[in-house]
């Protein structure tokens, strides 16, 4: 059975497309006309009057107090960019600061950054204990991997070893990083 396509169908489809295009063009022209009229109306309104008032900051009474502090960007000793804080109260504190008191030996103590007259302390961090712990975990991991390779027939034993291996890998991932090393380092005071 043969089907015949009617010529009217193709014609009606092109007619519909043309109608839609004409309708869209008419809508665009109408919107453009409205926009021009709105511009004209705005131009006529604005030409006779001053522009609309806008919000503007108007400073009230002049305060006797200066701002608490000022920040500025500068360079440190290394040449890197750094934000500096210029504390206006610092000058007042510097005027009231007393000369460091001498200790029993007659020597003046060095003042650290906190300005409390305590000598600066130097400490050394030691991560050897943590490093040994991590090394043992890595050795355990290698042993479990080797045992898994050797136990190639016993499924139950392989599952048990894989479970232990997963626990060791989890513990190793938690401990083998700089944060853990810093938290668990042993610090001792230098003399």
Image: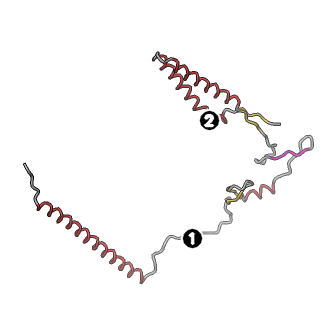
Eye-nearest disc, 1 or 2: 2
Task: Identify the residue under disc 2.
Answer: 177
Q: Is residue 79 above or below residue 57?
A: above
| Quarter residue 44 falls in | bottom left
- Tell me which residue sits at (67%, 30%) in the image: 131
Residue furthest toward the bottom? 48
Q: Say which mark, if any, is on residue 58.
A: 1
Spatial CA distance of label 1 from label 2 is 55 Å
Give yes or no for residue 129 being in the magenta stretch: no
Q: Secondary structure at mark 2?
A: loop
- For the point 50% across and 70% down, the residue is 55
Q: Main secondary structure of the magenta part?
A: loop
Report the span colored magenta. Answer: 107-111
In which quarter of the view is residue 134 placed?
top right
Q: Position of residue 145 (x, y in %)?
A: 55, 23
The residue lying at 59 percent from left, 29 percent from top is 172
Question: Residue 169 at x, y = what percent?
Answer: 55, 28
Where does the image place residue 139, in percent across and percent down from the top left? 62, 24
């Amino acid at each position: 059975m043969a089907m015949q396509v009617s010529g009217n169908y193709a014609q009606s489809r092109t007619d519909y497309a043309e109608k839609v295009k004409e309708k869209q063009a008419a809508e665009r022209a109408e919107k453009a006309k409205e926009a021009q009229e709105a511009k004209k109306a705005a131009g006529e309104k604005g030409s006779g009057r001053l522009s609309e008032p806008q919000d503007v900051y108007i400073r009230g009474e002049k305060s006797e107090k200066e701002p608490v502090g000022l920040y500025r960007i500068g360079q440190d000793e290394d040449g890197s960019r750094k934000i500096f804080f210029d504390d206006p109260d610092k000058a007042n504190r510097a005027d009231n600061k007393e000369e460091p008191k001498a200790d029993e030996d007659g020597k003046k103590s060095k003042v650290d950054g906190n300005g409390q007259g305590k000598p600066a302390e130097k400490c050394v961090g030691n991560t050897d204990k943590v490093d040994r712990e991590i090394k043992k975990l890595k050795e355990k991991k290698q042993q479990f991997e080797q045992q898994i390779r050797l136990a190639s027939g016993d499924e139950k034993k392989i599952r048990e070893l894989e479970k232990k291996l997963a626990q060791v890998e989890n513990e190793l991932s938690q401990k083998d990083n700089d944060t853990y090393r810093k938290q668990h380092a042993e610090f001792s005071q230098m003399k």
